């Protein structure tokens, strides 16, 4: 095990500050978007009001982000001698939760999809999506296994195939009810495997079954086909299947460059569905203008850039893979959400990280950001981080610059 020294860095501080800023933005914008004709009054039903719930979860998320950023990420590393450890337990829990949510009577159906597990009495409306737990589990587990395996991940039968099998199981279980999140999880898992040194052509061999699986999942449910048709020709059925994407475009356009002012949006009053969650970026553009929308995109760009720096700073293969996986996840999900609300891709049911209403998403993303910030706090006091293998698509060395040269992000460390 490496002898590591923890100290604050500008990278870890920036990740924490930007994460807190996005959580604060989400709290404010959900409060504004909740001022609709159908929202429960805050004083009469506070626990059912989205603004109150988002404020509570955002506050807890900030505490989570700060605490996790101070706790050693090494606690999640897979150690020699036993497989019964936190990251493995988390993967088992993820698969169990994803199976449980599909069981009638256990999983809760909302908006036509069974994605939720309830917590406590149904009157409180508390619950979480196991798919959010899956994002955390797949990043931590794959990063730990790949860091332990080193160059063995380049061997198809002994290294790559078992890991792909795990990613496929998680992706298939999520895809049963949430194709967008399934594609996101599989993409992040694939990127981690490539970064760890997996061969491109090994993953390429699986392109046909992956595409076949996506086509099957897409055509298995009529509502998915409806979304695809609505994306291709939104103006043909603006009051039917294309109502949501068309209203999203109207919402964005009505704000102009500078917006109608915070709280001044009108589309939230019964016109734009899911304005508090999946389409909150549209509300941001309406009230804060295109300039405000670009500022939000800028915050995510800063996070991605700092994630890139964290990959370069982290002293261990496990830390680099964690930082890389979280960066890819945040970047992909934010890009997918913005693409959906601007009708650049079909509706996916994926929220804007840290901003959209939803307690489970806020808490788990806060945890991941804290983990990424923590990887940037450490240096090897021995001055050597161990042997880095030649596989991988990136290389990151201790105290290196943000520019990441090609040659190997993760590999086995003889001291790890």
Image: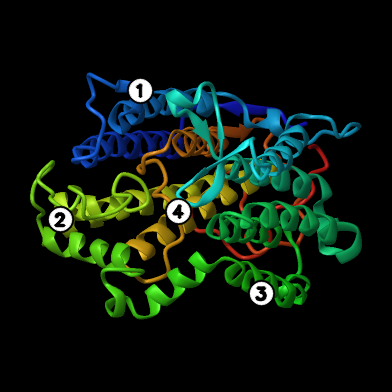
Q: Are marks 4 and 2 in contact (CB under 8 Å)?
A: no
Query: For mark 1, what is the residue?
Result: 47
Residue 189: name its quadrant. Answer: bottom right
Where residue 284 sits: x, y (%)?
22, 50
- Which quadrant does the N terminus fall into? top right
Label 3 crowd bin: few (<14), some (14–19), many (20+), radius 10 Å: few
Q: Residue at image x 81%, y 52%?
A: 150
Label 4 crowd bin: few (<14), some (14–19), many (20+), radius 10 Å: many
Label 1 crowd bin: few (<14), some (14–19), many (20+), radius 10 Å: some
Q: Earlier in the sequence, mark 1 or mark 3?
A: 1
Query: For mark 3, what is the residue?
Result: 211
- Tell me if I can see residue 401 in this picture: no
Query: For mark 4, what is the residue?
Result: 350
- Which quadrant does the C terminus fall into? top right
- Specify whether 373 is left or right of 1: left
Q: Residue at image x 35%, y 39%?
A: 18
Q: CA distance from mark 1 to mark 3?
A: 42 Å
Residue 289 numbered tag: 2
Where residue 57 sits: x, y (%)?
40, 27
Depicted 217 relative to depicted 125: above or below = below
């Amino acid at each position: 095990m490496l002898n590591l020294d923890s100290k604050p860095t500008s990278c870890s501080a920036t990740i924490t500050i930007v994460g807190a800023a996005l959580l604060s933005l989400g709290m404010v914008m959900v409060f504004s978007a909740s001022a609709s004709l159908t929202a429960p009054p805050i004083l009469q039903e506070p626990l059912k009001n989205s603004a109150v719930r988002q404020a509570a979860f955002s506050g807890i998320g900030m505490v989570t982000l700060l605490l996790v950023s101070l706790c050693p990420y090494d606690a999640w590393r897979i150690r020699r001698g036993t497989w019964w450890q936190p990251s493995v337990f988390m993967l088992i829990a993820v698969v169990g939760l994803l199976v449980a949510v599909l069981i009638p009577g256990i999983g809760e159906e909302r908006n036509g999809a069974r994605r939720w597990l309830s917590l406590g009495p149904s009157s409180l409306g508390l619950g979480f999506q196991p798919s959010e737990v899956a994002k955390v589990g797949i990043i931590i587990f794959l990063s730990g296994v790949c860091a332990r395996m080193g160059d063995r991940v380049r061997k198809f039968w002994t290294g790559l195939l078992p890991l792909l099998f795990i990613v496929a199981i998680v992706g298939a279980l999520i895809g049963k009810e949430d194709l967008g999140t399934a594609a996101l999880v599989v993409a992040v898992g694939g990127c981690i495997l490539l970064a760890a040194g997996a061969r491109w052509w090994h993953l390429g061999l699986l392109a046909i079954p992956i595409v076949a699986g996506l086509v099957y999942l897409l055509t298995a449910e009529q509502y998915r086909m409806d979304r695809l048709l609505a994306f291709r020709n939104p103006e043909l059925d603006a009051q039917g299947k294309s109502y949501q994407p068309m209203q999203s475009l109207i919402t964005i356009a009505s704000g102009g460059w500078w917006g109608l002012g915070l709280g001044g949006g009108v589309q939230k009053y019964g016109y734009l569905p899911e304005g508090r969650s999946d389409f909150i970026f549209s509300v941001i553009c309406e009230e804060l203008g295109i300039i405000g929308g670009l500022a939000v995109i800028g915050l995510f760009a800063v996070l991605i850039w700092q994630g890139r720096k964290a990959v370069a700073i982290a002293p261990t293969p496990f830390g680099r893979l964690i930082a890389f996986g979280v960066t890819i996840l945040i970047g992909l999900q934010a890009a997918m959400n913005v693409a959906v609300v601007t009708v650049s891709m079909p509706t996916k049911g994926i929220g804007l990280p840290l901003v959209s209403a939803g307690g489970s998403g806020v808490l788990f993303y806060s945890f991941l950001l804290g983990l990424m910030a923590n990887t940037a706090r450490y240096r090897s006091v021995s001055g050597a981080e161990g042997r880095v293998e030649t596989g991988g698509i990136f290389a990151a060395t201790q105290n290196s610059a943000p520019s990441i040269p090609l040659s190997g992000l993760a590999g086995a460390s003889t001291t790890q």
